[in-house]
Amino acid sequence: MYSARSLTIVCVLIMAAGQSCKLAEKKNDKSDSLALRQNIPPSPVLSPEESLKKMHVVNGFTVKLVAAEPLVTAPVALNFDEQGRIWVLEMQDFMPDTLGTGEDKPSGKIVILSDRDGDGVMDERKVFLDSLVLPRALCLIENGILVAEPPKLWYYEIQNDKPVKKTLVDSAYAEGGNVEHQPNGLFRDLDNWIYNAKSAKRYRKMGDHWLVEKTHFRGQWGISADDQGRLYYNSNEVNLEGDFFSPGLGATNKHQQEVAGYDERIVRDNRVYPARPTPGVNRGYMEGILDDSLRLVNFTAACSPLIYTSTLFGKAFYGNAFVAEPAGNLIKRDILIDHGYSTNGEEAYVKEEFLASEDERFRPVSLYNAPGGALYIVDMYRGILQHKTYLTPYLKSEIRKRELTKPLSCGRIYKVVPLDAKEETIHFTEDNSQLVELLKNPNGWVRNKAQQLLVDRKDKRVAPALRDLLRNTENPLSVIHALWTMEGLAVLRSADLLPLLKQNDWTIRMQALTVLPSVVDRGNYRQFLQVLLEMINNNDTLAAPYISYLAHSFESLNPAATQQLLLTLAKKYPGNRYVADGIISNLENRESDFYKEALSLSADSSILINKRLKKLMADIAEAKNNSNLKALAEEFPKGFALFHAVCQTCHGVDGNGVNGLAPPLNSSNWVQGDKDKLISIVLYGLSGPIKVAGKEYKAPQVSGEMPGIGTNKDFSDEDIAQVLSFIRGSWSNRAGKIKAGDVVNIRKILKDRQKSFTEEELNKSK
């Protein structure tokens, strides 16, 4: 254990990863902190030039400053436009002090940074939009910009770099949750949809209307994609997660809690190597969190994964993942490899990071590909970023003693480039034929921007040139971008698609399958069904999961043929979990009927497709017996509000837990058991591992610690009693109510406690 040492250090945690920090404090050892603190390097506010000197980047690369205060303040996200300007979102109002005083003031901004003299350093700041409250994401699209200002998502039309019209896209974009646990990202993907982290929604502009659709829930802070549009994300303690398949598939059965091939662990090694002692991290007092030099051992604030898609760094870097760890002041590089359906990866270096800083205030919260091929880093540059929801008295004291709250006026943007390398300069013009040519560019950012501009300009006269690119199958990437550009322009025809479904190159077939739902109709569906059946008969195992997802597109056209397609897949691939879950994704409210037909193919209930169906039917039956949540919300209004503001972001709105964050509350022995233990957990927190309903949950499957809320003055004893009563009666739980007096009693008994509980401690208590 390192609890004695870690008493001495400030508890610092980045908002982007959404963690809380609790340091153990021996009851009679408070004086030790002053003596031991002398062994830890100080954390002064450094100028950008001084901070650059504290950065260690791998051989062959250098870090350059792009922008700094006062040009930019508290940046958390950015977008590049076709002019090379940077649109930066500033969250200036986040935690002005330990009480969050003034956090609701409209001081957030979106600013446009320009490089007038062309030296690579921004030198002009223009405020596009101000008076925002805790804005968290932005996305340029058509002649406007999406802006996430919780709980709403707005679209602003732009004229002469000024907002001229405001349209509400989603009134519940970030409904519920606190500032550390709300949707973000607004990532415009290959398929012309906009995806988010910490969200199960996707968005698309169609004329003057916005489409909002359900998709898979993904990640926590930050989101990226590879050349195939497959999404990557992560959570606090997980290096990298992602999708094996295209993002728009497999989310059509509301009963499915998990779909194989989505939310998969991509890199399992979570080890990190900071350049300085980092004891001011979550659970720094626990054994195994810090090493002997007080450096973080594993990710605790992983965020903003980036798939690098440029040739500037060299061939070995193309398609690599970069992951930010702001609590450890570093950026990790992972090398990814495809294996059939799956993708996995490993750390690029042994006991070393791509970039690590000795400046404790260096907080890389977002990473981006860029027009010239560099890797851009958004550095919020703060000493303490823990939200008040989880701020302990000890942490408040440390912040006060070391004056870590101030200043709040810093912020930097950096770029990483190879030594002596020249960044590519692309000038986008009004000539759309130039944009078509740029779909061949080796830089992924350039290809993506060219596609987006073509779709945004809506000029269908480029269709013949795009159709020519489809025939140039020796360059699969240009084929793929041409395909999705045509989809975005609504000029794609079945005659364009059918030949691509028969290409030898798997990536072309993959995208042709993915785009198929946008063109299938009553006049051509038989042709497409025939091709899909041929793929199955020809043992195209890579295509099989995609075909299983696509069956949904044929259901309204020919239910009988669709059913036969699914049964053919079930018979051909009875043990393939990806195909099984793909089949099930088509069966909302028809699971039982299909199960009977599947059993007629094979009566063996242990076959995977049969097992998955049987489990899902059991889950559906259990859900039907769940409590009346509406009645509980009316009985415990404060508890219902607190659950949605704090609990559901990690435990799920359905109480069944969220992978990488927290175990289930539904059917939990801790929720339904001893109320005093449950109150203790909520007041002071819980350190894992923990067994729930007989299953052990530990990091990185879930976060290593559930933060307590007992010291947060925003939550009264009555609020806490209500939220516990709410969850003890919700879903399948059937337990008694808890009163405010019960919470008061536990506070009195545990009045001197500082650290979170462990399962062992709770089991010993009576």
Image: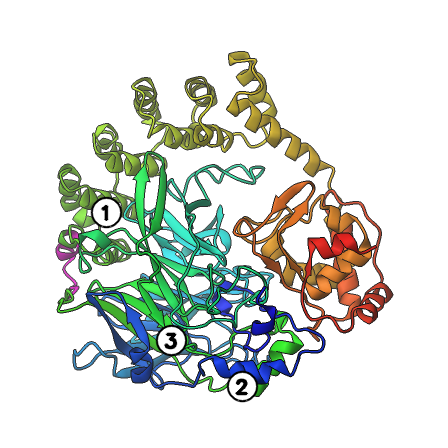
Above or below, 62 against 455 in this view is: below
Task: Check if residue 430 falls in the magenta segment.
Answer: yes
Task: Check disc 1 and give the amino acid type.
Answer: His
Q: Are marks 2 and 1 in contact (CB under 8 Å)?
A: no
**Left or right of 724 in this view: 256:** left
> Rounded to the nearest whole Å, what is the CA distance between mark 3 and mark 1?
41 Å
Task: Check disc 3 and give the amino acid type.
Answer: Glu
How packed mark 2 is, by other alpha carbons closer than 10 Å (few <14, some 14-19, many 20 or more), is some
- Numbered range of the magenta stretch: 427-436
**Left or right of 362 in this view: 476:** left
> Rounded to the nearest whole Å, what is the CA distance between mark 2 and mark 3?
18 Å
Q: Colour mode?
A: rainbow
Question: Residue beneath label 1, please?
Answer: 481
* Picture disc at residue 109: none
Q: Are marks 2 and 3 in contact (CB under 8 Å)?
A: no
Q: Residue at x 34, y 21 (%)?
A: 536
Question: Residue beneath label 3, please?
Answer: 358
Task: Check if residue 371 falls in the magenta segment.
Answer: no
Sequence-wise, the earlier of marks 3 and 1 is 3
Above or below, 751 against 688 in this view is: below
Q: Residue 743's spot in the image, x, y percent?
A: 81, 65
Question: Residue beneath label 2, please?
Answer: 402
How packed mark 1 is, by other alpha carbons closer than 10 Å (few <14, some 14-19, many 20 or more), is many
Sequence-wise, the earlier of marks 2 and 3 is 3
Q: Quadrant of the N terminus?
A: bottom right
